[in-house]
Image (cartoon, rainbow, N blue to C red):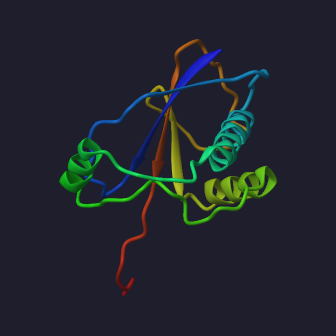
Amino acid sequence: MRLFYQQKVIGKKSRKLQKIPFSIDEPVTTLQDLLVQLVTQQVQQFNEKMVDTPLHLYLTDQQLDDATQYGKVHFGEKKNDSLQSVDQAMSNMLQAFQDELFLVLHNEESLDSLTTPLTIQEDDVFTFIKLTMLAGRIW
């Protein structure tokens, strides 16, 4: 089944959310089931990119011009070149959700619990909003 997800970080300048397609293979009955499948896919994609990184990195003139418009020129290399653990990523995701570091919306409806039952249809959209802490003192 094909679904979409969007990501938003509060405070970032990009206002338009881009729908990114992903598919689920196993039946999903709760939010936790969905998050487990999505995190597993993301870690696998990250680890595959690590293997496919070319040895000689270069930028074309067009890529250089595009990068200077955003104020950051880089070669796309990763600072951490080790493969990531799916289990560790799963643990981090569950802890972050319990600590309310991100919100999940299913077609604009907030999901507050990992055990929330889901009724998913083709082309549903899940939005992930990463919350940021405010700087300063409480009192």
Image: 82 above or below 66: below
- Viewer-nearest residue: 20 or 96: 20
Q: Is residue 70 left or right of residue 30?
A: left
Q: Residue lying farthest front? A: 56
- Viewer-nearest residue: 74 or 99: 74
Q: Is residue 131 left or right of residue 69?
A: right
Residue depicted at x 24% and y 46%: 61
Q: Quadrant of the C terminus?
A: bottom left
Residue 28, given in percent of the width and then of the height, sits at 74, 25
The image quadrant of residue 74 is: bottom left
Residue 73, given in percent of the width and then of the height, sits at 31, 59
Residue depicted at x 56% and y 57%: 100
Q: Is residue 11 left or right of residue 83?
A: left
Image: 95 above or below 35: below
Residue depicted at x 21% and y 56%: 68
Residue depicted at x 52% and y 15%: 123
- Viewer-nearest residue: 34 or 21: 21
- Viewer-nearest residue: 119 or 94: 94
